[in-house]
Amino acid sequence: MRTTTWTALVLAVRGALALPQAATSPSTSAAVTEATTRTSPASASTTSTFSAPVAVTTVASLTVSPVSVSTVVASPTAAADATLPSQQPLPPAQPWCPSEIFCAGQLLQTVNLAQLYTDPKTFVDKPTIAESSQAVLQAFASLNSTNATEGAITNFVNTNFAGEGQELEALVLGDEFNASPAFLDNVTDPLVRSWVQIVNGYWTSLIRTTNQSLICDGTSCSSTFIPLNHSFVIPGGRFREQYYWDSFWIVEGLLQSELYSVVNGTLQNFMDELELYGFIPNGGRTYYLDRSQPPLFTWMLSNYVDATNDTSILDRALPLVERELSFWNTNRSTTVTSPSTNATYAVYRYAVNNTAPRPESYLTDYNTAFDPTLPSLDESQRSELYAELASGAETGWDYSTRFIKEPLVGGLNGTNQALRALNIRAHVPVDLNSILYKVHSLLANLYERSGSTRNATRVSELCDQAENLRSAILDLNWNPAKLAFYDFNTTSNAQNDIFSAATFYPLWAGIVPDELLSNDTAAFGFFSSVNLVLSRYNGTYPTTFYESGLQWDAPNAWPPHQYITLQALRALPSNVTSTPLPTPPSDGSTYALIPSGQLGLDESALPPQPVSTTANASLTGTGADINIVNGTLVNGGNSTEGEGWRDTLLKGLANRYITSALCSWYSTGGSIPGFLDRLPDAALNVSGSINNTGNMFEKFSITDIDIGGSGGEYTVQAGFGWTNGVVLWAASQFGSELVAPNCPNPLDEATSPAATSSVSTSASATGSAASSTSTSNTQSGLGVPNAESSGFAVAGVAALVALIMI
């Protein structure tokens, strides 16, 4: 049994990822010799030391107190005396993940095949409780894993492993927390303001810090947890650690909530990781040390400095931004020659070096590789598949037809077949390259803001590199005929034709093609799919328009993309956005306004919009646009005379996002005491929410406004960090334009799609019958009917609004 120090693990990770060994900062290296003995995020068989990073003064002290963290109980899917299924060959050992307990190997594979938990991540988040890692491995060896029973594996896990997530402490914010941050004054609708204020309070249930008393040191116990020195916000649900790209939208919300020290702590944690590893891992577990995520740290840093004017953080941060940029240049860059201009560009891609199932999704990846209904794969093919699956996780879009060789190869139910067709490493993703364009630009700006004159040469270099990336994106990814950005596929040496929300990233990053700056028809054409969604569907903007069963495809709509789309809309100048919203031809729908070929799908192939439990709206023609009535978007805010098309879409999308978040919260038990009564138990029972008090879901639906999203490797999660962050940001930016939405009655949806009844949402409000043809969104309240599913909303609170002082 080998013994590895924390420093040795860091060096192993760097070696496996081809990181320069000199990446350890002087402060960290020096500290190793007199390190504070702390916990190890390393392998199950390690004895570790953790060097304290450079001390940094936070903006404000945090007053906290611990609360409990719940854990999952093992629930085998077979009888206790049932023998486990026969096992397929083990994958190769992974140099970056040496644990014999938590990384790819016999123990992890056996426990996963026992299927003790619905989510494979549960097991690898459990620290051991045996006297040593060696004792755990000896206990496992005594089981004879080839003939082990469900009961034996259950007993082994229950005896040798503690509850997942116990290395973390849930905290309650102290005096720094402001229940009524300044931006709430801009939210004029009383119901929306009350709800946003509740969302602002959810930070208190999502903030965490490291529980020093329960951290493993590699001898008394072992864990995958990477200990962090500062408080942070978790996404929620199964995502019980700090995550990389989630944190961007969490930070956006925290800044609106004026929780500056929590933002500072988040950034300090990322800087600690940059010092230790030379990059920011996907999340705060050692099984994420083979990959990163979209590199948004520099953008977070810039937004923090903008909000606080705390330029003192730059002394530590700027060298570490350079280190992250070096990681992407060394490990994720390639050169591509344009087939249209013959120019050669240095560009970025997602490409993870991995040849085994991901520990946190081991059974999922294992089943994808060994699916008996599909052709068998040899070891080389399985290794390639595992690399693609890990690269897909690095994109943040895990998974989407956007990166699949044959987008609809598996249909709606052929997820494994689709995943086997992933081709991520051969793509030049437009979103990644747009982000790194912005990173170069922001880093140059931050050098100038730091007040140092020594960096003039570096600023010039960064500006040149940013301009080169801009040229690459406009050459490789921009399609002036279709008026959209697409990924570039190096396998086919051509643009993909999969249209996705990635098309909006360049404008968010500040790359606006000339065609959009000089022509209002072209400018609208770029955003015409937003108009289609708001007019045709009940929900908000999807990731793609392909229905594949993958969670980053239709019908799912993710909070980050609502934010990015809104920011992209704001990037256009007023000279091309002030004309009214175009109307479709008399015999057509808003699909007719979309540039030819842009979506890559015929109108009849778009996702259907249900209008009852048994029927859908028309897929084509004038009957398809059921969510625009008399020129006004349902749940799209109040219409304004003479406003330009951009403002109509901004207001519509912001309202539709708030609608999705608020209505799904309301349908799962949310209420506002004294203002908005909780739904009756019969209605809440439809979604199994009788014991809930309102869920903030991680993703939503293009078609339904009162449920979370669906599909993917795990059940939809509640919490939820980036959802809350985008709600608070949207409220701060569009507060005066937000109108209380029209939410459907879950009971009517489930039992009587043709009924016209409604229920009261407040003791002071009275319900009224509503017809699906009387759709309107011109009054405030949840009682106005809309086209959602059955077409019937719960009773309104419009009459109550005037009586309530918020």
Image (cartoon, helix red, strand yellow):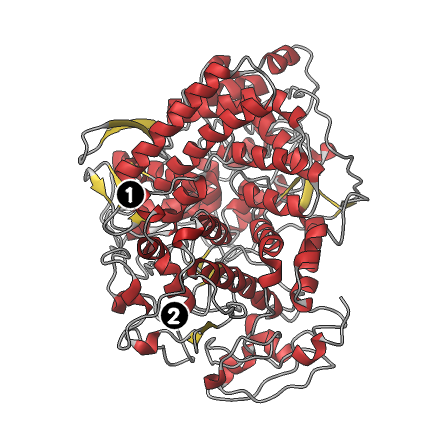
Q: Element under label 2? A: helix
Label located before the other in sequence (2 or 1): 1
Q: Element under label 1? A: strand
Q: What is the C-alpha distance between the residues marked 2 and 1?
A: 27 Å
Residue 805 x, y percent position in the rendering:
77, 69
Compared with 692, 398 (above or below) is above
Is residue 194 something one can see in this rendering?
yes
The mark lying in front, picked from 2 and 1, is: 1
149, 387: nearer the viewer: 387
For badge 2, the amino acid type reads Arg
Compared with 625, 301 (above or below) is above
Residue 408 x, y percent position in the rendering:
26, 56
Compared with 1, 622 (above or below) is below
For badge 1, the amino acid type reads Trp
- Circle 2 is placed at which residue position? 536
Q: Quadrant of residue 727?
A: bottom right
The residue located at (46%, 77%) in the rendering is: 787
Q: Residues within 10 Å of mark 1 (few under 14, many from 20)?
A: many
- Circle 1 is placed at which residue position? 478
**In the picture provided, is 1 more to the left or to the right than 703?**
right
The residue located at (69%, 56%) in the rendering is: 184
Residue 469 x, y percent position in the rendering:
35, 31
Residue 442 x, y percent position in the rendering:
50, 30
Disc number placed over residue 757 in the picture, else none: none
426, 503: nearer the viewer: 503
Q: Residues within 10 Å of mark 2 (few under 14, many from 20)?
A: many
Is residue 47 something one can see in this rendering?
no
The residue located at (67%, 65%) in the rendering is: 693
Q: Are dots 2 and 1 in contact, CB under 8 Å? A: no
